[in-house]
Image (cartoon, grey):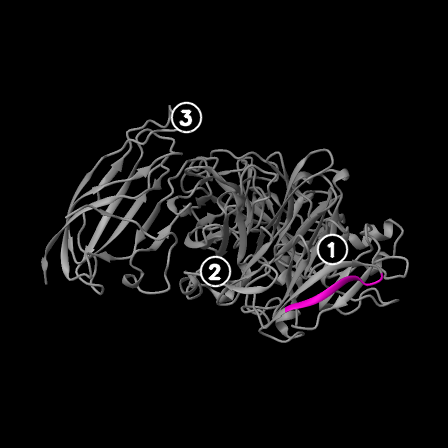
């Protein structure tokens, strides 16, 4: 019989059974569709060798008046600005006090509790884990250790293994360390007034005099709180190897401690923060909505006001960083700056859910805020209140007939979830409704219109706007807004929402890949507390596909060459910048595949025998000589039976991509041979080698009837 073309509908469909989707694709990983053709996705490289602390949940890219390209990175521990590959810590200081160093443990009168061990196996300068001969005396994560002259920050501990290493910490140099090298750290107790310190908070000491075996260089630096003993006593580690016998005196001296704003969580904990689990699960004022900001999953909102940066941790204060002050200057509370500038600074909201700098109208807007009450600077927080500064004046928040500062309370819902700036309006989501906010000028300044009630949204970061259409993930379905709210049809709706961890819905985030007309949503699968899956909507071809990937934030800014993402190893990655995974020091292959739904001959009343495949594929973009893919036809007798044994032939290119940079006339194996028999079959193409890039065309199979059964 004639050759049979293998043509399949673009996109992946998991809404029905495998056989019911005949003529379509059914499963995949690390692929995309472009102009209806399936291809492997692009790889990624590390932005620089620099790293940051914490799990990043936000990025913001802008250029200042001098043409400097900045990238803001907000993590659960800190806020950084990346420039030139380095990460500059601009985390705000919330309080400066005079503490007293004490003893650990308090009963011994000894300021040092020595944790000492040796390496059970050498490590390289880039290793992200190590094994100790004994980890019994080392605290649970996180912690700081010292090996030779290098300090190392670790984020995980399991018996004798330390993981999540940040190398070259505190300005030391990452190095290779030999087996049996000494590993140590020492714990210091700080006795202080009640300053709201929580575990993992950062504090910088200055003016301390070293006693009991310490050096001033070890003490008068940034330290991290590793254990809170009481409300006025906590401990931190000093990296070093100390001899217990050499330390005979206790106590300490008064110095200055500058406390950074409280750190947040990197995993959502049920009952912490508004909307634990599914949005609006509890009423306002319940335990889930009144937790301190440091006890919630840390999400940042950020925007540039001119060349400056405005940032706010969710349920925290509003902070401002002046570009002119340089990268060594921390962001400051907008309240304090307002007072310095001669305005009533105490009336800047001291708490917000999200902030925005309306770029055209030049307002700073808080979504969720303390209402203005004359004579009462810190009035009760209202999660449904939208409040804004005077136009072109970020410091003036007191409403007056002579300015445009003001506020407006939304009525549908119990808390604002998020917002997005579009070309014509600002869209605001509460936990049950969508509003439009438009500038109308004085005296009303902003108008508010209810667009849709009784809708849902998965998380504050699950929205993306492109081509003046806004898309978002709701609870159980996807939405779009283009002047009206519509359900976005999805061929993966069932697949995604039956395998998503709703308890970690707060982690869901969306990002765009404009070069390929894609919107990506990243989420935690059903049995995972960290992000490990993504689903993509191609808004040009209107098709869906999915895969596995661990990312924590995404940004396609347009003023950097590639889309950027952050991962769980404290790195910013450039996507579509390679064909391999080059996040670390060694290139790793990206395993990509797609498999069709089952197809048959006629109505499936005959068995078919396939003896050869005539491939159609190109390898443009590969960077190795003679790259190859594997094409497989998988047979089975009936829909409910398992796949039978199939040959797995390789299709190899004849082109040398390391030498040729022009367009290649594709030359590859003209035919590959296989022997298989079945009533139904599926087609699969995959690759898992370094340097391989491919796009599938229309392969053909040579198939003949092989009897009935």
- Of callouts 1 and 2, which one flags the residue occurring earlier in the amino acid sequence? 1
Q: Could you classify mark 2 by the number of other residues whose Cα lies within 10 Å: few (under 14), some (14-19), or many (20 or more)?
A: some
Mark number displayed over residue 613: none
Quadrant location of the C terminus in the rendered image = bottom left
Tell me the residue that label 3 is attached to. Answer: 661
The residue at the point 86 percent across, 53 percent down is: 339
**Residue 178 in the image, given as x and y percentages of width and height:** 44, 35
Q: Secondary structure beneath disc 1?
A: loop
Residue 275 shows in the view:
yes
Left or right of 218? Residue 592 is: left
Magenta-span inclusion, residue 445: yes
Mark number displayed over residue 529: 2
Q: Are marks 2 and 3 in contact (CB under 8 Å)?
A: no
What separation in Å lies between label 2 and label 3 (alpha carbons)? 44 Å
Foreground of the two, 644 or 540: 540
Magenta highlight range = 443-451
Tell me the residue that label 1 is attached to. Answer: 318
């Amino acid at each position: 019989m004639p050759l049979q073309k293998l043509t399949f509908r673009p996109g992946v469909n998991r809404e029905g059974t495998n056989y019911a989707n005949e003529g379509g694709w059914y499963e995949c990983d690390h692929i995309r569709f472009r102009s209806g053709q399936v291809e492997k996705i692009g790889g990624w490289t590390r932005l620089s060798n620099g790293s940051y602390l914490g799990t990043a949940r936000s990025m913001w890219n802008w250029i200042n008046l001098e043409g400097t390209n900045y990238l803001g990175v907000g993590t659960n521990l800190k806020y950084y600005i990346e420039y030139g590959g380095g990460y500059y810590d601009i985390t705000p200081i919330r309080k400066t006090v005079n503490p007293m160093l004490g003893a650990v443990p308090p009963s011994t009168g000894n300021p040092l509790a020595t944790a000492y061990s040796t390496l059970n196996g050498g490590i390289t300068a880039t290793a992200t884990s190590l094994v100790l001969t004994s980890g019994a005396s080392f605290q649970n994560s996180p912690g700081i250790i010292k090996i030779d002259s290098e300090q190392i920050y670790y984020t995980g501990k399991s018996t004798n293994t330390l993981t999540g290493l940040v190398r070259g910490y505190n300005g030391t140099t990452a190095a290779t360390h030999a087996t049996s090298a000494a590993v140590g750290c020492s714990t210091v107790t700080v006795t202080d007034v009640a300053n709201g310190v929580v575990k993992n908070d950062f504090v910088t000491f200055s003016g301390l005099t070293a006693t009991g075996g310490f050096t001033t260089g070890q003490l008068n630096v940034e330290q991290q709180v590793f254990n809170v003993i009481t409300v006025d006593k906590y401990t931190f580690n000093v990296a070093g190897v100390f001899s217990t016998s050499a330390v005979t005196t206790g106590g300490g001296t008064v110095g200055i401690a500058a406390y950074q704003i409280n750190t947040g969580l990197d995993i959502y904990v049920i009952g912490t923060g508004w909307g634990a689990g599914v949005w609006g699960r509890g009423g306002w004022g319940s335990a889930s909505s009144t937790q301190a900001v440091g006890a919630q999953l840390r999400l940042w909102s950020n925007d540039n006001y001119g060349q400056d940066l405005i940032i706010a941790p969710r349920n925290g204060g509003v902070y401002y960083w002046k570009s002119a002050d340089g990268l060594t200057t921390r962001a400051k509370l907008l309240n304090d700056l307002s007072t310095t500038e001669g305005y009533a600074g105490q009336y800047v909201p001291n708490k917000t859910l999200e902030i925005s700098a309306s770029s055209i109208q030049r307002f700073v807007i808080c979504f969720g805020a303390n209402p203005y009450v004359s004579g009462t600077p810190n009035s009760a927080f209202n999660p449904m209140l939208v409040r804004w500064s005077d136009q072109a004046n970020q410091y003036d928040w007191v409403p007056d007939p002579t300015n445009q500062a003001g506020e407006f309370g939304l009525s549908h819902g119990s808390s604002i979830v998020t917002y997005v700036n579009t070309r014509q309006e600002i869209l605001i989501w509460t936990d049950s409704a969508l509003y439009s906010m438009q500038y109308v000028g004085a005296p009303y300044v902003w108008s508010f219109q209810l667009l849709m009630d009784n809708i849902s949204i998965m998380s504050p970061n699950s929205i993306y706007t492109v081509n003046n259409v806004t898309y978002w993930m709701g609870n159980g379905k996807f939405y779009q807004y283009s002047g009206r709210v519509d359900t976005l049809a999805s061929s993966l709706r069932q697949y995604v929402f039956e395998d998503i961890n709703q308890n970690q819905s707060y982690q869901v985030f969306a990002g765009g890949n404009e070069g390929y007309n894609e919107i990506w949503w990243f989420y935690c699968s059903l049995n995972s507390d960290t992000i490990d899956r993504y689903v993509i909507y191609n808004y040009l071809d209107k098709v869906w596909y999915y895969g596995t990937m661990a990312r924590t934030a995404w940004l396609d800014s347009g003023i950097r060459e590639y889309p950027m993402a952050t991962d769980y190893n404290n790195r910013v990655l450039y996507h579509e910048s390679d064909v391999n995974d080059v996040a670390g020091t060694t290139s790793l292959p990206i395993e990509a595949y797609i498999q069709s739904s089952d197809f048959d001959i006629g109505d499936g009343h005959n068995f078919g025998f396939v003896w050869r495949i005539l491939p159609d594929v190109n390898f443009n973009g590969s960077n190795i000589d003679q790259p190859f893919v594997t094409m497989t036809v998988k047979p089975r007798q009936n829909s409910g039976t398992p796949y039978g044994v199939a040959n797995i032939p390789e299709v190899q290119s004849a082109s040398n991509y390391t030498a040729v940079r022009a367009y290649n006339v594709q030359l590859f194996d003209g035919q590959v041979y296989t022997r298989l028999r079945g009533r139904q079959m599926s087609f699969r193409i995959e690759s898992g080698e370094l340097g391989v890039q491919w796009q599938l065309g229309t392969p053909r199979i040579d198939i003949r009837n092989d009897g009935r059964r």
